[in-house]
Image: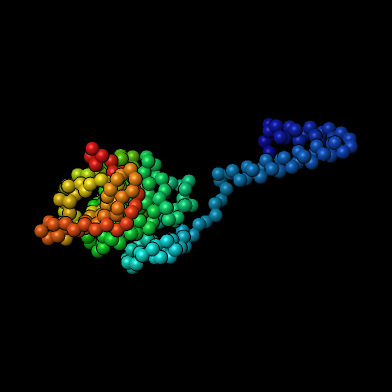
Amino acid sequence: MCPFSPWFVAWNRVLRNPGRGKMAIWSKNVLKRILILFFFGLQLLNPWKEVEAVDWEAKRTQMVLMDLMPRGIWTPSVLKVMKRVPRHEFVPKHIRKLAYADRPLPIGEGQTISQPYVVAWMSQLLEIKKGMKILEIGTGSGYQAAVLADLGARTFSMEIRPNLAREVKTRLRKLGYRVQVRQGDGYYGWKKQAPFDRIIITAAANHVPPPLLKQLKPGGKLILPLGNVRYYQNMTLIEKGAKGKTITSQHGQVRFVPMVGKAQK
């Protein structure tokens, strides 16, 4: 106990001047209880207190069994990757305990990390094969990019926000994921690396950016949340035929943060 603490001073006064009768005993007991509560509170707030280890692998397994498989995620490669990629490494530390809840989480700058089900769902709809070249628009935390890379895809990802782009480059490199990240407006795609077998847009748009369709290979697939960017969108899959003709299918209602940059103009 610090000798200059007011609690220490008060305690010494009681000890040196015990007084007589029940009042003195009452004062000592009350002060003792206050001191116990005070130091118990310090223990709870102690930043150096050892944190109990979390079995993240068990949480990922539970997520797959409870949130993904019952909702139609059945592709073996996708399920294996979702059990392997550490989502808790892609969320802020203060909300890490929520990492495997099936919900989007804030990552800063008004952006979110998509819920695990949506990440798995979009990956499954794209039917990714090992060695495919994929462009992701909207790197965000890097979680979707990590999933794509773990599926064996040659992954290229664009993030318009400079701070997020810098952070995600460091994060993916530290975790060992081979993803090329570029800061810039994804509306225009990545012409130097085109064409792509698959393109995934992880932000809401009210139209399909023409440059991205142009950079999609014949036989390729593009997926995005398409519709009203302020409310809800439809998960839309576009397949490009050998002669450039496209076939569009919709797979359910979603809600994503809006695509920014040229897409807003």
Report the side of 216 relative to 255 (left or right): left
Q: Nearer the viewer, residue 39 or 113?
A: 113
Report the side of 29 relative to 248 (left or right): right
Question: Where 234 falls versus 14 (above or below)?
Answer: below
State which quarter of the image contains the C terminus: top left
View extreme (right): residue: 21
View extreme (left): residue: 243
- Residue at 71% over, 43% down: 36
Q: Quadrant of residue 154?
A: bottom left
Report the side of 179 relative to 3 (left or right): left
Question: Where 174 falls versus 66 (above or below)?
Answer: above
User: Residue 202 placed where, x, y %?
Assistant: 30, 50
Q: Quadrant of residue 26?
A: top right
- Residue at 30% over, 39% down: 162
Q: Quadrant of residue 5?
A: top right
Question: Where 3 falls versus 252 (above or below)?
Answer: above
- Residue at 55% over, 54% down: 52
State which quarter of the image contains the N terminus: top right
User: Residue 110 placed where, x, y %?
Assistant: 37, 41
Residue 126 seen from this side: yes
User: Residue 139 placed where, x, y %?
Assistant: 31, 48
Q: Nearer the viewer, residue 139 or 220?
A: 220
Residue 168 seen from this side: no
Q: Nearer the viewer, residue 260 or 171?
A: 260
Looking at the image, what colour scheme do you see?
rainbow
User: Residue 169 placed where, x, y %?
Assistant: 32, 47
- Residue at 59% over, 43% down: 45
